Image (cartoon, grey):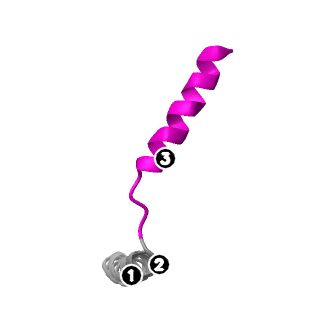
């Protein structure tokens, strides 16, 4: 039981050493991630649509 207690004490100590982002940094990072995800979703949707159209066109020949 003392090993578990020591583990959580160490975790708490290490968490105090973490450099947490400021609100402005967090907002910037969040906007970057969300916009990247939206861009990639749109990109792959367009690529998928193009490949599907190409396959349908080839199969109709």
Whether the magenta-drawn stretch holds residue 2 is answered as: yes
Closest to the observer, 51 or 35: 35
| 1 and 2 marks in contact (CB < 8 Å) | no
Closest to the observer, 60 or 5: 5
Name the spot of residue 15 as percent of width and height, x first.
Answer: 49, 46
Which residue shows up at 35% across the image and 75% down it?
Answer: 55
Give the residues drawn in magenta, as a range: 1-21
Among numbered discs 1 and 2, the one appearing first in the sequence: 2
Q: Main secondary structure of the magenta part?
A: helix
Q: CA distance from mark 3 to mark 2?
A: 18 Å
According to the image, label 2 marks what residue? 23
Say left or right for 30 vs 9: left
Name the spot of residue 10 as percent of width and height, x first.
Answer: 50, 32
Q: In the drawing, what numbered circle is on residue 28?
A: 1
| Residue 37, image quadrant | bottom left
Q: CA distance from mark 3 to mark 1?
A: 23 Å
Which residue shows up at 38% across the image and 77% down it?
Answer: 25
Residue farthest right in this picture: 1
Image quadrant containing the N terminus = top right
The residue mark sitting in front, 3 or 1, is 3
Among numbered discs 3 and 2, the one appearing first in the sequence: 3
According to the image, label 3 marks what residue? 15
Closest to the observer, 40 or 4: 4
Among numbered discs 3 and 1, the one appearing first in the sequence: 3
Name the spot of residue 51 as percent of width and height, x first.
Answer: 33, 77
Image quadrant containing the C terminus = bottom left
């Amino acid at each position: 039981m003392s090993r578990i207690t020591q583990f959580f004490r160490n975790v708490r100590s290490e968490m105090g050493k973490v450099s947490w982002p400021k609100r402005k940094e967090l907002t910037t990072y969040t906007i970057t991630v969300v916009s990247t995800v939206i861009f990639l979703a749109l990109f792959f949707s367009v690529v998928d649509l193009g490949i599907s159209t190409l396959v349908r066109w080839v199969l109709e020949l």
